[in-house]
Image: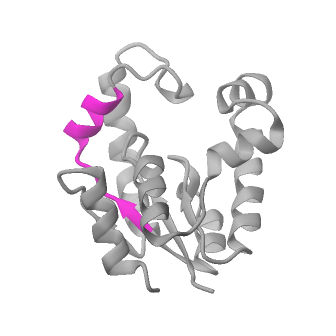
Amino acid sequence: MSRNLILCGFMGSGKTTVGRRLAKILERPFLDIDAYIEEKQGMTITDIFAQQGEEAFRRMEREACAELAARDGLIIGCGGGTVLREENARLLKQNGIILLLDVPLPLLQKRLRYDKKRPLLQKPNRAKVISDLYKERIPRYRAAADHRVRPRKTVYQTAQYIAHTYGQL
């Protein structure tokens, strides 16, 4: 079977949207780590953060990385914080390559301006929160990634590029 293709990047970078399209193109299963955790825990990420805290969520995330890395041929969409932990990136790289969806900050600001579901953004002055998180995280995403992918004009074109460039690995 083929290695997993793991999409990482800042929240709003298109990991889930591109991942689903890529999975259709390559005829491979797509699994979103956050959705995987939600299904396994029977609660939303927002509720996990509120009831158990971020550290509990990060433990669940590490377990999910280990479980998914043990499988072959998946397209995996990471949560925005997944590969910020070196252990998670190391686990995922055991059987896959990590592709950073390297979306510029102004486009992320536009995509996230009305988002209501991401716990880390539910604060005043959202634009500054996004900018500060981006500046903190982007070097770490780049360090974790095997390759960087800039967005194309459409989701389909981005997925096509990834399929053509990395789909046979």
> Residue 48 placed where, x, y %?
74, 30
Give the magenta-colored segment's residue range: 99-112
- Residue at the extreme top: 124
**Does residue 114 sit above or below 16 in this rendering?**
above
User: Residue at 49% of width from left, 19% of height from top?
Assistant: 122
Please indicate whether residue 82 sits to the left or right of residue 57 in the image: left
Hey, which quadrant is residue 114 in on the image? top left
Please indicate whether residue 100 sits to the left or right of residue 28 in the image: left
> Residue 155 placed where, x, y %?
30, 51
- Total count of labels: 0
User: Residue at 70% of width from left, 66% of height from top?
Assistant: 68
Q: Is residue 41 magenta?
A: no
Rendered-image quadrant of the N terminus: bottom right
Hey, which quadrant is residue 63 in on the image? bottom right
> Residue 80 placed where, x, y %?
50, 46
**Does residue 4 sit above or below 1 in this rendering?**
above
> Residue 167 placed where, x, y %?
42, 78
User: Residue at 36% of width from left, 46% of height from top?
Assistant: 13
The residue closer to the viewer here, 133 or 146, is: 146
User: Residue at 66% of width from left, 77% of height from top?
Assistant: 72
**Does residue 120 sit above or below 71 in this rendering?**
above
